[in-house]
Amino acid sequence: MIEQQARTILSFIGFVVALIPLYWLLQAFNVGCILYSIWVAIVCLCQFINGVMFMHTAEDLSPAWCEISTRLQLMGGMGIVAAGLVIARRVSRITTDYALTFDERREIYVDLFIGLAPPFSQLIEYYFMQGHRYNVLEGIGCYPAIPSSIIYLSLSGIWPIIIGLASAVYCARTIWALFRRHRQIKELVASTNGLSLNKYYRLMVMATIEMLCTVPLGTYDLLGAVRSYYPWNGFADLHLNFDRVSQYPHDLIRKNWGHAPTGTLWYTNGCALIFFALFGFTSEARSFYGRVFLYLPRRLGLLTKNVVDIERGGMQEQDHGDFVLRQPQVQDILTIDLEGSARSVESGEPERSKSNSTTHSTESFT
């Protein structure tokens, strides 16, 4: 019970943190990271809703939701793997010799095809793989009903391994090129729009993690499917009594599966947390968090003018919606009115002259 509650809470957290970096990822239009964020968020949301609805029951509470969520989870699982391939390919294209000559628009189209074709193909092929409508597992919720037939192994089970191996090839090429031309990596990154060196290393770490996780986990799932292989006797046998819904309380889950099939659920939550750890603390993210943190005081009237941010260096003004973030120069003097207004008075020679004049006038008056 505690595990189910923890998994449900973590799924909601994963849903939120997976979408937080989406704002600035859309600005940079990093296709791989955008797709990764969306697919992880979709799967985490489905897991959270299922966990809340079916925490203490295996009854078929919402057939329409189960029909939708089983397909979304199947698509999301393949979409996460495909998005990892897009990220690995992107990093490889930046690092290798021909990175400076590729067509940006064409690359976006290719990335979209790689990231969307595998998951949507799962949606089309799902009918040919499923044995009945769906399963309902207590504490887990709606779960796809897919026997381990030759159809499933060829259309779905083998593809995470194939995609993971493709990602491994791109990662190996990236690492090799990085060792060969590490001195030129800054120039290569600088020549790519919307990319910095820190973002490049984050993308590389993300691609490497996906490569290291996808192939072993995909192999483990494939071996489990082979051990429970369902002999192929045609679609008439596979779809026999197709409209049924199998319901599994906790005891039947252990009896039929040996253990609750929660590995995929924990894996998705881990993907969300790793993704946020890599892309949720960038400079754009910290700037966004600052604006959100100051939004409520601004609306309550605690800050009625410019929000001033002092950093060492020169002066820079940036418009961020309701606020103007200003980095004053060293010679600027910041004075804050306790009644809620802020003003900046520049110090300089004219100001000192004025002050001296005022002092002289006062002395004369005395």
Image (spheres, helix red, strand yellow):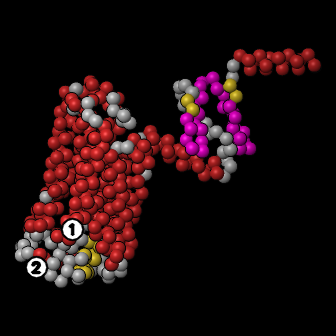
Q: How many marks?
A: 2
- Residue at image point 27% right, 76% down: 137
Whether residue 257 sits left or right of residue 277 in the image: it is left
- Residue at image point 45% right, 41% down: 284
Q: Assess whether mark 1 and mark 2 are in contact (beta carbons under 8 angstroms).
A: no
Name the spot of residue 337 as percent of width and height, x first.
Answer: 72, 39
Q: Earlier in the sequence, mark 2 or mark 1?
A: 1
Q: Is residue 118 visible?
A: yes
Q: Residues within 10 Å of mark 1 (few under 14, many from 20)?
A: many
* Nearest the eye: 108 or 318: 108
Type of residue at label 2? Asp
Q: Which residue bears the numbered disc 2? A: 237
Name the spot of residue 301 as percent of width and height, x first.
Answer: 68, 49
The answer to which image quadrant residue 128 occupies is bottom left
The answer to which image quadrant residue 8 occupies is bottom left
Name the spot of residue 19 as percent of width and height, x first.
Answer: 41, 54
Whether residue 142 sits left or right of residue 227 in the image: it is right
Q: Residues within 10 Å of mark 2 (few under 14, many from 20)?
A: few
- Residue at image point 60% right, 24% down: 330
The answer to which image quadrant residue 328 occupies is top right
Q: Which residue bears the numbered disc 1? A: 126
Type of residue at label 1? Tyr
Name the spot of residue 345 as percent of width and height, x first.
Answer: 70, 28
Q: Is residue 132 magenta?
A: no
Q: Which secondary structure lies at badge 1?
A: helix
Q: Which residues are magenta?
A: 318-344
Rounded to the nearest whole Å, what is the CA distance between mark 2 and mark 1? 16 Å
Q: Is residue 56 visible?
A: no
Quadrant location of the N terminus in the rendered image: bottom left
